[in-house]
Structures are given as C-alpha cells and as structure tokens.
Amino acid sequence: MQDKDFDSLLKRKFEHQDLQEYQEGKWAALTDKLDAFDHKRNARSKLVYALVLATLLLGNLAWLFSWLGNSSNRTSKPLEAVVKRDTLFQTIHVVRYDTLYRTIILESKFTGPDQPVNFSNTRPISTKSNSSAFPPAITDSLQISEIERETTSRQEIKDAGINPTMAASSTEAPILAAQSGNYKDKANVLSPLKSIKPESLPLNLGISNPLIPAANLISKDILQEQNPPQSEEPVEKKPSFHWQPMWVNGAQALFFPGRLEGYVLNTGLQLERNLSNRIALGGSLRFGLASAESSDISRLPSLDNTAPVQPGPSYTFDHWDVDFMPLVQYQLYGHLRIASLGKTRLMAGAGTQWISTLPYQIDYNYIHLDRFDEEDVEFEKNTETRWQGLNLLLQAERPLGKKVALGTRLNGIVPHRPLQTVLDQSLGLDFWLKFRL
Amino acid sequence: MAQQEEILRIIERCQKGDRHAQFTLYSSFYGWCLAICRRYSRSEETAEECVQDGFFKVFTKIHQYKTTAPFKPWLKTIMIRTCIDHQRAHFKEPIQVELEPVHDESGIPEALVNIEVEHLLFGLRQLSPIYQMTLTLYAIEGYEYQEIANMLDVSIGSVKSNLFKARGKLKALLTNLKEKETHAG
C-alpha cells in the first residue's frame, strides 16, 4: 500500500465521522471554571491598581516629608556653616606647632640627651615664672578663647628669657610673623615640611630626632580649607517662580441623558506658576463653542429649565439641539508631579472651573402625531448663566526646547451640585504650548 | 459567508464576556472539537478533557483572535496544541504493541478500505504517543514536516522517521485487527 494512499484513507475516514452533541454538565463545569478565572483576574487587576496607588501615595508622602525636612534645614544651614568655619579655626595648627616649639625648648632643660620627651610632664618654666608666656599644650578640642590665649608675641618670648634670635628659627619665624595677622593667615603661612632638622631646632641640646614628624603637624583641616570639598548633597534646581504663559486648545466630550451629540471646542490663554519643582498652580481663561443634541427633554441646555412652548396638542417632542453655544471658561487648578518618564513629566491635579454661557439659541423639534411632519420651535436664551464644577486633571508635559514645552491633559469635570445642564459631566483633552519667559 | 458573519457576531459578543454567546459557540463547535481531540488522545476521557481545556483557552484568549482570519482553523489549532500539551509528558513512553511493521508498496487492501473510524482510532491509540501525533498531524491535518517538528519540539529527521514507523505499525495493527475480525466472524 502506498503511503499517500494510506494517508488519504485516514483523512477521508476521519473527515466523515459522526459528531457528538455537547453535554450540559460539561458546559456547567466550563462556566464555573471561567467564572473562577474572571474572579481571579479581577482580583489581580484590583491588586495591581491598589499597588500602583499605594506606590504613588507613598512616593509622594516620602517626597513631601523630605521636602519639608529640606525646607527646615535650609534655614539652619547658613548658620551652621558659619559655626563650622569658626570652629575650624586654623590657628589650632599654629598653636600645636608653637606648643611643640616651646615644649622642646623647655624639655631640653629637663631631659637628658637621647631621652624621649614626655609631653604630659612638661611644665612651663621661665626665669620670671611667667606662666602665661608658656601655657600647657592644647588639644584638638581647644576653644577659641584658649587658642587666642595661646598666641604669644615675640615680646612675650623675650620676656620669658629666651633669646628671640634663637627662638625665631626657620621653623618658628612664620609663626611669629603670622601672629600679627588673623587666624586664617596664620594657617596659610604654615607650609608643610617634610622633616624638621635637629640643627634647626632652637637650643639643640642633643635631641637626635624630631619627636613629631613635620608632616603630622599639617592637619587635613588646613588642606581642606584651602580646597574646600564639594558638597555631596545634590543641588536642587530652583524652580522658576515666574508666571509662565501658555496657549491652550481643548476639546471636551459632554455626557448627558439622551445624548445624540455633545462637545465643546475651546481656545485660550493659561498662566502657570511653580511653587516648587513638583507643585504648580495655574489658571486659564478660554473661549469655547459647545454643540449639543439630545432626545431627553428633562435636561435642557440652560440652567433654568425653561419648558419650551409646544406647537399644539397633536405634537410630540422629538429632540432639541444647540448648534453653537458660546462659553467662557475660567479655571483655577493645582497639580503635583507624580512621575517623570525621561523628559516627559506626568502630573495629577485638581481645580475648579466656572463656565459662563453667553446668549445662544436652542431648537426644539416636535413631530406631528398624525402627519409625522416636523415642527421646530426656536428658543432664544439671552441671559448669561454661570456654572461651577470640580476639575480632575491628569497631564503630561515635555519640553521642546529651553523656552517651549508641549503638553496634553485629560480634563474631567464633575459638578459641585447636581444641575440640569449639559455641562454637568465632561471629559476633555487639552493641548498647549508653554512659553518660558 | 453568512455563517462566517454570524460566527463573527458571536465572537464579538464573546470578546465582551457574554456567557450566552460563549454557550452558543461551545454548543456549535463541541462535536467538531471532540472529533479532533479524539485523534490525538489516548482515551475518550482525555479527549473530553482536552476539549474543555481547549474551550477554556478559546474564551480566555478570544480577544487575540483577529476577525479577518477564519475562525475554524484558529479553533482547530488551539485544540491540537492543547492535546499536544496533554500528551507531551507521554512522548517518551515505550511502544505498547510490538508488531512487525508493514511496508508494502501495493495498493490499499480491500480489508482496510472499508475499515470503520472507530477501528482506525483504536489502531492510532495503540501507537506510541509521538507516533500517533506525528501520523495524525501529517496524514489527517496536512501539516508540513517543519511545522510538525516545531509543534512536537523534535527534529525534522525524527518526524520523518516517526512517520515512516507509525504508518508501518498502524498498517500492521489494522491488518491484524481485520484478520482477527474475519476469523471471529
């Protein structure tokens, strides 16, 4: 038997087999499985939404707290900086050097050759027993007043019975010279030395090696002061506190009962001002044209619900329509930056909106019950009406250059109180060009 | 054409989660799907399980169906893949019935020409799962070697080899079965 023949035999046999009917129980089992799946999928999507919302909330709270913390730090930082600079007081190093110098001189009288000098046992000695001329060695925690007390003049050294010529050796000369200047100058006078030669020490009385390497005498503080380190904290870019004008264009879909048609097109100017890098306030003034048509007579496009005059008893209401309802829209809003996607900034916010409807014309369409012909009744609305609602905003903005940005916004409006107007609920999309002055 | 439009309308409702539309689709195609799954399954119970699982996939992934394409091939592919997934674990099982394969080049014996579908099904299920799948995919569904290799995750060489062996063994099985029937009759 050829393979092809056998294959075609199989195919032919299976193509013409009888089909079985479904069983009710099987469908019920499948329905249960599908219900469970839908339930699980809904629960999962709810969890995802909850997680996203929680992340947004926590992120914004964290940012808020850090912002509040930074703003309180900003006021205390300048003072702290002054204090730090004062505490740094470079004369500490001068005093150390000076103390060493004087200690060496003094100890050379008490300790023998090749004996280590014990700084803890040093005692200021002078022929006149002038303790103020040779105060004890000072520590890092020396206070400013103490440092000042430690500075001695050439005259004081002389008074202490030391030969000023010897005292003013190559190592001490800068110190003495510095004493007439301020403390910062003193620090600058001290230049790092690789070592102190024994013969350069005053009254070389057999001390073979300098007790403290000269390199140790140069504190890091001095070097850091000469090249102050860069702050590790990121420098927050200052927001622009200027009002930024924007040319805004929008389209809104209107939602009302029996809606056959309903939209608003508007254009206008908007001003926005940053309060911080994340928060901004703004306001807009726009002129719009609304177009609406509905088969529901209960919600008229006006606020006063004026019932139209029916042409006669044989007529029944069919629909009303407004071709062009001029509007002036005023809006105040605030928004918070919630995320950044590259250069694009995503913002969420809320605001309030007032809409003034200018005089317009409504056409009420009636149909004769017998003849089925149409009769239009025109109604002029000559007074201005004002309406107010809550704005919910979700917007994205992307800079196009240094001075221009392009943005789009989802703009939902919910009325403050239920009103019989076509403007009660709307969802719109705005586009704008922002100019930075 | 009208039937396809009707199916599309039902599918659109299914995509919106309409249970009635899902039931219409299920009841319309249940028998057809079961016939497909029986060829790939080792038993009737497994075939019914595959149909249920296949329809579950259809209803949960129906939004992926493009209405420009015909529906039946899409449904058939889902059913076949569901059956393959069910059988994949058994692909390396040893052959249950050891018979000398028949590879004659003569015409179809009279005994096999009039063989019933149930006997063919019985014969197919006696083959190893991989032979059963390969032969059904190639001979009945008309898939190419490469497509079968991709579906079963084997090489083209294995497909050809399995197909050759499967044909030979099925012929032997069916001939043997017919002979037994004749002797019994």
Image: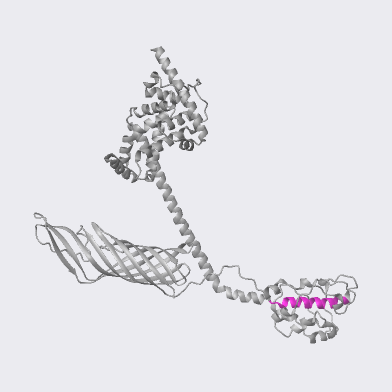
Quadrant location of the C terminus of chain B? Answer: top left
> Eyeballing the image, is A194 above or below B143?
below
Question: Which x, y percent locates residue A283?
Answer: 37, 71
Q: Main secondary structure of the magenta part?
A: helix
> Eyeballing the image, is B154 above or below A335?
above
- Residue A104 sits inside the magenta stretch: yes
Along the horizontal axis of the image, is A284 left or right of A300? right
- Residue A146 sits inside the magenta stretch: no
Along the horizontal axis of the image, is A430 left or right of A342? left
Residue at 19% from the left image edge and 61% from the top image edge = A320
Given residues A45 and A50, the one toward you in this image is A45
Residue A162 seen? no
Quadrant location of the N terminus of chain B? Answer: top left
> Eyeballing the image, is B65 above or below A289?
above
Question: Which x, y percent locates residue A352?
Answer: 34, 67
Snapshot quadrant of residue A260 = bottom left
Question: Which x, y percent locates residue A72?
Answer: 53, 70
Magenta segment, which residues?
Answer: A89-108
Question: Which x, y percent locates residue A141?
Answer: 71, 72
Snapshot quadrant of residue B30 = top left
How many numbered callouts? 0
